[in-house]
Amino acid sequence: MESPKVLNQPATPILIFFLTISLMFSVSGAVPYDYMQYVVQWQPAVCSNPLSYKRCTKLANQSFTIHGLWPSNYNGASVTQQGGQAFDINELSPIKPQLDKCWPSMFRENDEFWRQEWSTHGTYSLNYGFSSQLEYFDQAVELCNSYNDWIGDILKTNGINPSDSTPVKSTDIADAIYYNFSKSPALRCSKRDGSVDGRKNLLEVVLCFNVNGEDMVDCPRAISACPSYIYFLSSATESSAPPSSATGSSATDTFQSALSWALAALLLHVAI
Ligand SMILES: *[C@@H]1O[C@H](CO)[C@@H](O)[C@H](O)[C@H]1NC(C)=O
Ligand SMILES: *[C@@H]1O[C@H](CO)[C@@H](O)[C@H](O)[C@H]1NC(C)=O
């Protein structure tokens, strides 16, 4: 029973110090993710996707637009610790025109895309990297304005131009971006439409940032997924026609075309 007495006096201020520190942490809460993935997608590749649920309803431009801004962990574990705030489009009205430009969906209403991205990714950054939905989406717009066109310019400057017939070394793309930003990007690829030859297209470029999306950091290697040679497509291989499955609008289209056929038949009948 000697030793606790000896330690008692000097230990008190140290104990208070550690109690204060741990209290500070428990009040602010440890951030439940390590970094943010800022993911941009190359529209021609998005619209060369063999998956029918992703059939594009808009014409693909030669541009990188946002897929998402994702709280992520270096060990690959998904971020689920917090979240659940419902998406509110009204909160985004001050930046809606910029979001439409930077973050379009290629196959549905833009706000449906934003809603899904918020509920599966963005919400987990609330109260950590960002204090509101507006702040989160506004940071994405800021990154879009800073980097989306720039990525295209970097590739062009390095002689990497869109082509449907000539493949590019994926390391040439990654290196060009790395040398410009001094941070490693990640590249992700998709299969070419209806591919039987296993050819892959550059689908996404990922830039990585700290928890509030402000400072660029190296992307972990593990989130890259492209073979050595890939296609930086110049055009979408998929038609931009809406899917033929009976959604509300295509059912209307079918009805209208049936109606015009009936009318034509009637006119023909009258004419005869
Ligand atoms: C493609 O570019 C045009 C012209 O800038 C624009 O109006 C349109 O919204 C863009 N489409 C997509 C899907 O980004
Ligand atoms: C980065 O890319 C831009 C756009 O192509 C170019 O103007 C600039 O010279 C590049 N900087 C470096 C360090 O490569």
Image (cartoon, rainbow, N blue to C red):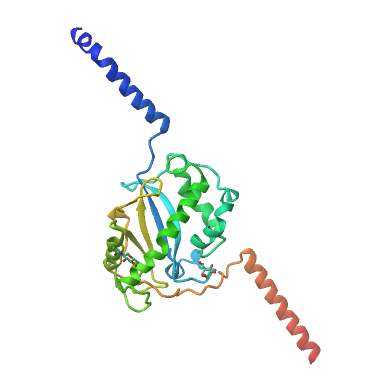
Q: Is residue 61 visible?
A: yes
Quadrant where the C terminus sits is bottom right
Q: Residue at x 74, y 80 (%)?
A: 262
The quarter of the image that holds ligand 2 is: bottom left
Q: Residue at x 35, y 24 (%)?
A: 20
Q: Is residue 11 above or below residue 165?
A: above
Closer to the camera, 195 or 148?
Answer: 148
Closer to the camera, 181 or 185?
Answer: 181
How far from the left and from the top, in percent, is residue 240? 52, 73
How far from the left and from the top, in percent, is residue 221? 28, 55
Q: Is residue 270 left or right of residue 63?
A: right
Query: Looking at the image, how many numbered discs can be counted on the residues?
Result: 0
Q: Residue furthest top?
A: 1
Q: Residue at x 52, y 46 (%)?
A: 133
How far from the left and from the top, in percent, is residue 109? 57, 60
Q: Is residue 65 above or below residue 208?
A: below
Q: Is residue 120 left or right of residue 269?
A: left
How far from the left and from the top, in percent, is residue 142? 45, 55
Q: Is residue 237 left or right of residue 18?
A: right
Quadrant where the N terminus sits is top left
Q: Is residue 90 above or below residue 16?
A: below
Closer to the camera, 14 or 80?
Answer: 14
Q: Is residue 198 visible?
A: no
Q: Residue furthest bottom?
A: 272
Dividing the picture into quadrants, the one containing residue 145 is: bottom left
Q: Is residue 28 above or below residue 15?
A: below
